Amino acid sequence: MKRLALGLAAGAVLAGVGATAEIARRNRVIARRVPDGAEFGSVRGQVRTVIADDGVPLHVEVHEAPTGSHNRKADLTLVLVHGYALNSDCWHFQRAGYAGQLRVVAYDHRSHGRSGRSTPGNATIEQLAADLLTVLDQVVPEGPVVLVGHSMGGMTIIGLAEEHPELFGDRIVGVGLIATTAGGLTPHRMLLPMVPTSVGGSFAERLVVGLNRVHRQVDGGRRLGRRVTTVITDLFAFGDDVPASYVAFVDEMLRNTPFEVVAEFYGNFAALDKFGAVPALSSVPTTIICGTADRLTSIGHSRKLHAHIDGSRLVEFPGAGHMVIMERHAEVNDALDGLLAEVLQLGAD
C-alpha cells in the first residue's frame, strides 16, 4: 500500500511537470506568431453615461457620423452589444472600420468594463435587454438603428425582441447576430469542457457557487496564473493561430471581469430559451455570423437561428472560433457591409 501511495504521488508530480512543460511550450508557440500592429483599446468615442432603470450607470461611447456627408449610410446608427465577461473594446475592428462612415454606439454591459455594478438579482438577460432599450432611448432617440450583438450581446438583442417585438421594423431596421444563440446551451462547457454533459452541468453550477464565496482569491489566482489563462484563452476564444496580442487582449478583458460578475451572469445560460422570440427578427434584414470552430456557441446554434428567422442570411467562417469578430475581422466587416447595404436598399424602395 505504501508503495502504491508513493507511486501515485510520483505520478501526480510527473503529470504536473508534464502539464507545466506543455503550458510553457504553448506560450512559446503563441509568442512566436506574427503580430499585425493592431493597437487594441485605442479607438475611443465620445463618452456618455446612461443611467439604467435601476440606477446602474452604463458607460457608452459614441462615434458621430461625418457631417455634410451625402452617404445615406450616415443616416443610420450602428449599436454594438458585446459578450459575456468582455467589454465594448472587443469591437476594436468594427469601431475602427465604421467610425467615420456612420454613427456608431458601443457600450459596456452592467458590471462589465467601465459600467457600474449590478445587484445580483438584476444580472439577467432580461435586464440587459432593458438596458439596451434605455441606451437606445437616451443615445439614439430618433433615426433608424442597426443592432449587432456578439455572444451574450446577441442574446440581449433577442431578449429585446421578446419584450418589444414592435421595435423591429420600426426603430430597428437591421440585426447582426454573431456567435450567439437563443437557447440550448450547455454552459458548463465554458468551464469544464472535458466533463460529460450528464454530470457536468450540476457539478459546474455547484463549483461556480463555491468559487464565488472566495471570489477575491479566485481573482488573485487568475492574475497570477497568466501563462495558464493565456493558453486557455487561445484554445477557447480562437480557432485560428491569431497574433499573441489578440490572445493577450481577450485574456485581459476576461481577467478584468471579477469572478463575482462571471458567477452572477453564469446562471442565465442554462435556462435561456428564447427561440419563440426570434421570429420577430424576420421583419428586418438579419445576418447571422459564426465560426465553425466555435467551442462556446457552436455553429449549430447559428444554423438553428437561421432556420427560425425567415429571410435571414447565414455566414459561416470555416475554422474560426468564438472571437470571430477579431480573428476574421475583415470578413466579418464585409458581412456587416452586406447587411447595411440590404438595409439601405429596403429604405430606398
Image: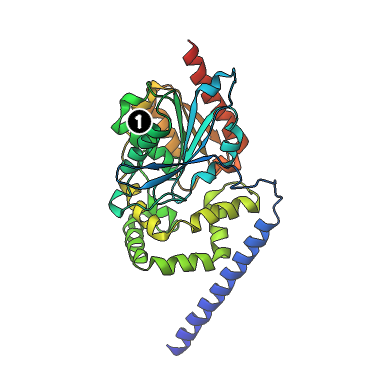
Dividing the picture into quarters, in which one does residue 188 lie?
bottom left
Q: Is residue 301 left or right of residue 247?
A: left
Q: Is residue 348 left or right of residue 41?
A: left
Residue visible at 61% across and 47% down in the picture: 40
The three-letter code of the residue at mark 1 reads Val
Q: Tell which of 227 and 260 is nearer to you.
A: 260
Residue visible at 38% across and 47% down in the picture: 57
Position of the N terminus by quadrant: bottom left
Q: How many marks?
A: 1
Q: Is residue 46 left or right of residue 258?
A: right
Dividing the picture into quarters, in which one does residue 132 lie?
top left
Residue 298 x/y as whole percent = 46, 43
Residue 70 x/y as whole percent = 59, 17
Residue visible at 48% across and 28% down in the picture: 77
Residue 17 x/y as whole percent = 58, 74
Q: Is residue 174 above or below residue 298?
A: above
Q: Is residue 123 above or below residue 175?
A: below
